């Protein structure tokens, strides 16, 4: 029976991982190298994450330093950051690129907090959709070698799983909102 639930648990875990990635990409006034995770550069014809072509470090609380392993990648990385939705202009000193994160205004913090909540709600919807798919699949088991009681039990266990993941989403959203709102 457990393998029937396992599929839905895996999907819910993937949803949580996705949420974690999205929340990690939201910058909260402090330099977080994860804001670069979604930015890819053209490395000899292959779209490659910045972390794979350069050393990314955080020398100060509000600065990210990117040191490409090949000098010819400087301009490529700089351009990729400029065209991204990061909203920060990189400074290039000829050997490294620096991203300085400005202090966030109260209004911007509130917007980011709303964005965090929106992403959390989207994750909850995705988890509930997974539950619905699971319940639909369990209903189709009616008339097979699976008894009504076992189907009901699967539904209840799936609901417990759903509740656990929804609680986890709320926790992550709360932590990220606190981080964003902290000056």
Image: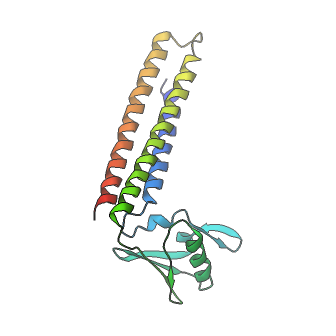
> What is the number of callouts on the image?
0
In the image as oriented, which residue stretches furthest toward the front? 107
Which is more toward the observer, 17 or 90? 90
> Residue 93, how many percent across, how many down?
50, 89
User: Can residue 36 be spotted in the picture?
Assistant: yes
* Residue reaching furthest to the bottom: 94
The residue lying toward the viewer, choosing from 98 and 139, is: 98
Whether residue 6 is visible here, answered yes or no, is no
Q: Position of residue 124 (x, y in %)?
A: 45, 39
Residue 179 as seen in the image, left or right of residue 154: left
Residue reaching furthest to the left: 183
Where is residue 96 shown, x and y percent of the image? 50, 84
Q: Report the colour scheme.
A: rainbow
Q: Residue at x 37, y 54 (%)?
A: 113
* Between 26 and 12, the one nearer to me in the picture: 26
In the image: residue 92, left or right of residue 45: left
Q: Give the residue drawn at x 43%, y 52%.
A: 115
The quadrant in which residue 24 appears is bottom left
Locate residue 58: give its quadrant.
bottom left
Quadrant (top left, top right, bottom left, bottom right) of the C terminus? bottom left
In this rendering, the answer to whether 10 lies above or below 142 is: below
Q: Quadrant of residue 83?
A: bottom right
Percent position (x, y) of residue 101? 40, 73
Viewer-nearest residue: 144 or 20: 20
Identify the residue shown where x is 33% and y is 45%.
171
Q: In the image, what residue occupies the spot 48% across and 73% down?
A: 88
């Amino acid at each position: 029976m457990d393998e029937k639930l396992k599929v839905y648990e895996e999907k819910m875990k993937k949803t949580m991982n996705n949420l974690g990635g999205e929340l990690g990409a939201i910058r909260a006034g402090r330099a977080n190298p994860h804001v670069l995770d979604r930015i890819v550069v053209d490395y000899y014809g292959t779209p490659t994450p910045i972390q794979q072509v350069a050393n990314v470090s955080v020398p100060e609380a509000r600065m990210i330093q990117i040191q490409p392993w090949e000098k010819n990648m400087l301009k490529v990385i700089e351009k990729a950051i400029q065209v991204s939705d990061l909203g920060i202009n990189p400074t290039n000193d000829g050997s490294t690129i620096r991203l300085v994160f400005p202090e966030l205004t109260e209004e911007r913090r509130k917007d980011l907090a709303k964005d965090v909540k929106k992403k959390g709600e989207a994750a909850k919807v995705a988890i509930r959709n997974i539950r619905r798919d699971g319940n639909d699949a369990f209903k189709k088991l009616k008339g097979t070698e699976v008894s009504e009681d076992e189907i009901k039990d699967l539904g209840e266990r799936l609901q417990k799983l759903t509740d656990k993941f929804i609680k986890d989403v709320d926790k992550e959203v709360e932590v990220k909102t606190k981080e964003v709102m902290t000056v």
